[in-house]
């Protein structure tokens, strides 16, 4: 006999209610509801710290069918995930598949979500929900049932980077060249990208004064929330811009670099979250397929004249990268480390490493 299925609800701040079936943990949660249209990669997406505080809608219609990999470590990092835990507040899918099948799966998505007490809802018309979010813009939402309820909470108002970063510096030793990686919620694949290129990574907390360190390069990581809450990182970056040590910003890191350089940032209507965002490189006839996960964007207009827009989004024209005209400072709003998604823009790591020598 089929187990009794628990009815659960997604309630949006505009009052819209979607009813579905619970899977994962039975807990009420609240957060910004965002959608990702990628077709694969839920283990990587769910562990991406940039999703901290958000309820994630996956628009691909069937989720869970390839299960979840085990917890093996490699180079002091989780081998298959982007951080050590599930970071999303909750998960919303159309059809959930519990009968998984994959060569390295060790558990179902629902079991894994239970380990981290993350609730999910299936049976939601994710197409209708996504259309609603595109029309109204991102909204707060909550997953609740008859027994569990919570208030609407906007987690972006807190400094989320401080919650997801390392608390003390960690060194990943490889080659002679060393980068300091300012961890505002870094994805493991950014660290792996440097280790694969034989670069030693010194990972430090978001508010660490990295300007005191003698290193070959500075990397500002991706991360959750509003970039303007990373006040100390912006301050340290502003100081670093007076010198010539190469700086690479990725996603939140690019926004922080922009703010330090004199640009502004603002919240997008519903963000970019997918594996096929077309980004054109300014000034040349080249367009890349990029991986994205961001809800804020840089307004590059106020940048001083020694900075340029580097990339822009072909769908909505918003900024996707900035670059200094003479110093080795640049930031990509998309994810050159991919994971999940195509790695067409990995050359940005090579470009940064060339700038370090
Ligand atoms: N992936 C990221 O680094 C996201 C950056 C920022 N939190 C945003 O949503 O825009």
Image (cartoon, grey):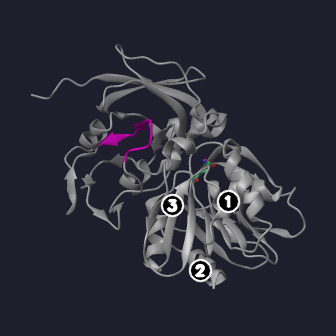
Across and down, in percent, residue 132 comes to 58, 34
Q: On the picture, is 179 further left or further right than 314?
A: left
- Which image quadrant for residue 174? bottom left
Across and down, in percent, residue 138 comes to 61, 36
- Callout 2 environment at 10 Å: few (<14), some (14 to 19), or many (20+)? some
Across and down, in percent, residue 36 comes to 50, 49
In the picture of the structure, the residue carrying the numbered disc 3 is 203
Cβ atoms at labels 2 and 3 below 8 Å apart: no
- Callout 3 environment at 10 Å: few (<14), some (14 to 19), or many (20+)? many
Q: Earlier in the sequence, mark 3 or mark 1?
A: 3
140 w.r.t. 217: above or below: above
Asked if residue 61 lies in the magenta stretch, the reply is no
Provide the secondary structure element on which disc 1 rests: helix
- Which image quadrant for residue 301? bottom right
- Which image quadrant for residue 258? bottom right
In the picture of the structure, the residue carrying the numbered disc 2 is 353
In the picture of the structure, the residue carrying the numbered disc 1 is 254
Please give the name of the residue rendered at 57% of the width and 33% of the height, measured from the top-left corner. 155
Which numbered circle lies on residue 312?
Answer: none
Q: Earlier in the sequence, mark 2 or mark 3?
A: 3
Instruction: Compute the Cα span from label 2 to label 1.
Output: 17 Å
Q: Give the residues in magenta.
A: 85-96
Q: Earlier in the sequence, mark 2 or mark 1?
A: 1
Instruction: Compute the Cα span from label 2 to label 3.
Output: 17 Å
Whether label 3 lies within 8 Å of ligand 1 gets the answer no
**Identity of the residue furthest to the right in this view:** 305
Provide the secondary structure element on which disc 2 rests: helix
Instruction: Compute the Cα span from label 3 to label 1.
Output: 17 Å
Q: In what quadrant of the picture does the N terminus appear?
A: top left
């Amino acid at each position: 006999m089929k187990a009794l299925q628990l009815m659960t609800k997604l309630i949006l701040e505009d009052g819209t209610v979607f009813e579905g079936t619970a899977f994962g943990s039975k807990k009420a949660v609240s957060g910004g509801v965002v959608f990702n249209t990628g077709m694969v990669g839920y283990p990587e997406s769910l562990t991406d710290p940039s999703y901290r505080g958000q309820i994630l809608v996956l628009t691909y219609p069937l989720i869970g069918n390839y299960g979840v990999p085990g917890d093996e470590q490699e180079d002091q990092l989780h081998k298959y995930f982007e951080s050590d835990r599930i970071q999303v507040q909750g998960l919303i899918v159309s059809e959930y598949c519990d009968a998984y099948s994959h060569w390295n799966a060790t558990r179902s998505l629902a079991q894994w979500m239970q380990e981290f007490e993350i609730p999910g809802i299936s049976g939601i018309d994710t197409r209708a929900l996504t259309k609603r979010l595109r029309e109204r813009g991102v909204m707060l939402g909550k997953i609740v049932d008859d027994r569990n309820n919570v208030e609407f909470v906007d987690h972006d108002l807190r400094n989320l980077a401080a919650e997801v970063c390392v608390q003390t510096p960690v060194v990943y030793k490889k080659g002679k060249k060393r980068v300091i990686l300012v961890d505002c919620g870094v994805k493991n694949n950014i660290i792996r990208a440097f280790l694969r290129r034989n670069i030693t990574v010194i990972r430090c907390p978001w508010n660490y004064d990295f300007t005191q360190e003698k290193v070959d390069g500075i990397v500002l990581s991706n991360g959750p929330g509003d970039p303007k809450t990373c006040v100390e990182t912006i301050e340290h970056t502003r100081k670093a811009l007076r010198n010539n040590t190469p700086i690479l910003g990725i996603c939140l890191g690019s926004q922080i670099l922009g703010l330090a350089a004199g640009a502004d940032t603002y919240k997008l209507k519903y963000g970019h979250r997918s594996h096929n965002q077309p980004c054109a490189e300014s000034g040349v006839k080249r367009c890349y397929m990029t991986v994205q996960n961001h809800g804020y964007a840089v307004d590059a207009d106020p940048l001083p004249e020694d900075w340029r827009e580097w990339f822009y989004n072909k769908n909505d024209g918003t900024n996707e990268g900035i670059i200094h005209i003479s110093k080795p400072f640049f930031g990509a709003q998309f994810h050159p480390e991919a994971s999940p998604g195509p790695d067409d823009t990995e050359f940005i790591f090579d470009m940064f490493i060339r700038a370090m020598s």
